[in-house]
Image (spheres, helix red, strand yellow):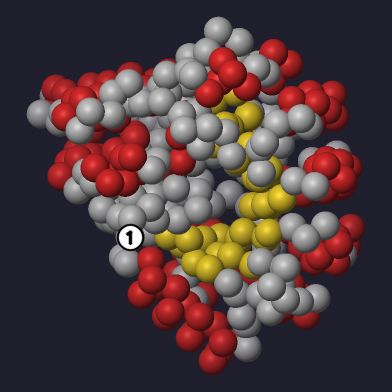
Amino acid sequence: MSSLNKIKHRFSSPDTQVELLGDNEAIGIPTFRDKLEGIGLYPLKPTGIEIFQVNVGKMCNQECKHCHVDAGPDRTEIMTRDTMQQCLDAIRDTSIKMVDITGGAPEMNPHFRWFVEEISAMGKSIMVRCNLTIILANPKYRDLPEFFKKHKVNVVSSLPYFTARRTDAQRGDGVFDKSIEALKMLNEVGYGQDPSLKLDLVYNPSGAFLPADQAGLETEFKHKLLDNYNIVFNNLFVITNLPISRFLDYLINSGNYDDYMNELVHNFNPSAAFDVMCRNTLSVGWDGYMYDCDFNQMLDMKISSGSNHISEFDADSLESREIRINQHCFGCTAGAGSSCGGTLT
């Protein structure tokens, strides 16, 4: 039976999504495990923990069509200060280099600035996934560019395209103009120009297809944004849409699910598989539970280690764990590969 006929409604349950992904064998798609075994990479194991990714809440001022977090203004899940403190205690004496703070709009967490200040005091590098429009959403956020600058935060922001029509179609009416204004504010304090103030953009395809070449897109984005708006930035991260949450909902409702999964499998890249982000990244959810990656987090696939809450953080155990996989992992290994930091090969 076609996957389209199995489910017709919006996915509210991670278990339902995992069940559907597991049905892929019925439509003739090999498992991700099969592919890893074929290149001698199963079981998939970490190479270490270099990046500590923390989702501080699903509340967001936007409700983007492709959002795998299913974030929005109506979400109430938010990380408490106590859980943030557990995160700080866990990484304090480790070799973890980077803390990647995400959401939702992470800045909407009432303890966001305190968390950044504490991480900065440790001497760790900080990356914040900023949706740009949050800077203009309320006067209390207007000083975010200066706050980011003070703590040398690497700002990473989604910009689906360099035109209003395509950006607003994916992220909502008026988002492009607000994003341009926010990017100018970041440029004004030195982002994209001062080597210590990195400003990176993120591109996701708008439909059921793999993204174009990252280097080519980056050149085009830089040219268009500079010529049309006098905006500069450092890198463009091209990320493949994974078949989960809102994008999975789109694939099912548009009848593209089976074809998209076949496309991901057909373009499996062994080189990308060796460098998938779950091998050097640990993801922590708003409630403190740990995951192999941000996508597993949205499917509620907690780490396989016996202790899966940040309050029980054990670096040795985590670095020897077996990484949990499912069919959505094909999204990270298709074509040039995909990670939170862009393409892999």
Please provide percent x and percent y for residue 129: 64, 52
Question: Label 1 sits on what residue type?
Answer: Pro
Viewer-side residue, 70 vs 127: 127
Query: Which SS class for mark 1?
Result: loop
For residue 232, side relative to residue 255 (left or right) = right
The answer to whether residue 253 is visible is no
Looking at the image, residue 285 lies above or below residue 147: above
- What residue is shown at x 76% (from left), y 30% (from top)? 93
Give neighbour class at mark 1: few <14, some 14-19, many 20+ (Cα, 10 Å): many
- What residue is shown at x 24% (from left), y 42% (from top)? 270
Quick one: quadrant of the C terminus? Answer: bottom left
Q: State the residue lying farthest toward the left.
A: 28
Quick one: quadrant of the N terminus? Answer: top left
Viewer-side residue, 278 vs 232: 278
Which residue is under mark 1?
211
The answer to whether residue 319 is visible is yes
Q: Dividing the picture into quarters, in which one does residue 17 lie? A: top left
Looking at the image, residue 164 lies above or below residue 2: below
Please provide percent x and percent y for residue 32: 25, 29
- What residue is shown at x 54% (from left), y 92% (from top)? 227
Q: State the residue lying farthest toward the top.
A: 306
Please provide percent x and percent y for residue 331: 33, 43
- What residue is shown at x 45% (from left), y 56% (from top)? 342
